[in-house]
Image: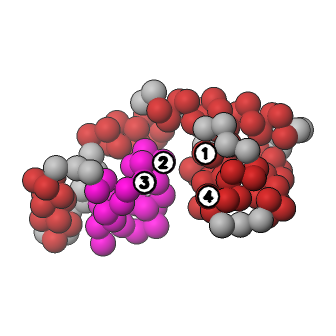
């Protein structure tokens, strides 16, 4: 299966590949790149952009990420909430964007806090901002 998505490949590409996709390509890629991806997957090969390959190799050789990488630790919805927190959205704004209640978003934040063993919501926010900025700078 080839995943064609509007979502950032550095955040969601790895997740799709781990779930069994043979490739991941962004919808905004030039048509030639999409065709290349389709051909590769049709031939039984994987298709991964150079940028995502570099990121995966970096993670493979970097032990400090083990257990602290949100992509590995959080559920899909928790990762969405974590990313939105990192972009500065409030609980209510996130709830509106995801069509969920603010209480549900607060539950996700508590889950994130527990999974990373953070001591406060402030620590969740600080780390979400740092992580989101690091994703934008790659």
In the rendered image, the vertical position of residue 25 relative to residue 123, given as above or below: below
User: Mark 2 and mark 1 in contact (Cβ < 8 Å)?
Assistant: yes
For marks 1 and 2, the one nearer the N-term is 2
What label does residue 97 carry, if any? 4
Secondary structure at numbered mark 3: loop
**Residues under labels 1 and 4: Cα distance?**
13 Å
Q: Residue at x 39, y 49 (%)?
A: 9
Q: Are marks 3 and 2 in contact (CB under 8 Å)?
A: yes
Q: How many angstroms separate mark 1 from mark 2 (CA)?
A: 9 Å
Q: Does the image show residue 63?
A: no
The answer to the question of whether label 4 and label 3 lie on touching residues, with beta carbons closer than 8 A, is no
**Residue situated in front as seen by the camera: 124 or 19:** 124
Q: Nearer the viewer, residue 42 or 60?
A: 42
Q: Check disc 1: other Cα within 10 Å, few if <14, some if 14-19, many if 20+.
A: many
- Whether tag 4 and tag 2 are in contact, CB under 8 A, the answer is no
Q: Which residue is mark 3?
A: 7
Which one is closest to the eye, mark 1 or mark 2?
1
**For this view, does 88 lie left or right of residue 54?**
right
Q: Secondary structure at mark 1?
A: helix
Q: Which mark is residue 11?
A: 2
The first of marks 4 and 2 along the sequence is 2
Residue 2's mark? Answer: none
Q: Is residue 112 magenta?
A: no
Magenta span covers which residues? Answer: 1-27
């Amino acid at each position: 299966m080839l995943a064609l998505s509007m979502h950032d490949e550095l955040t969601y590409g790895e997740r799709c590949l781990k779930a069994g996709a043979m490739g991941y390509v962004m919808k905004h890629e030039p048509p030639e790149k999409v065709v290349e991806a389709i051909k590769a997957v049709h031939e039984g090969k994987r298709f991964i952009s150079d940028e995502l390959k570099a990121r995966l190799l970096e993670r493979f050789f970097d032990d400090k990420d083990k257990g602290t990488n949100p992509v590995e630790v959080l559920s899909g919805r928790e990762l969405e909430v974590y990313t939105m927190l990192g972009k500065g959205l409030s609980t209510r704004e996130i709830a509106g964007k995801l069509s969920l209640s603010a209480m549900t978003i607060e539950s996700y934040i508590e889950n994130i806090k527990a999974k990373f063993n953070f001591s406060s919501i402030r620590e969740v926010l600080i780390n979400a901002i740092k992580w989101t900025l690091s994703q934008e700078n790659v």
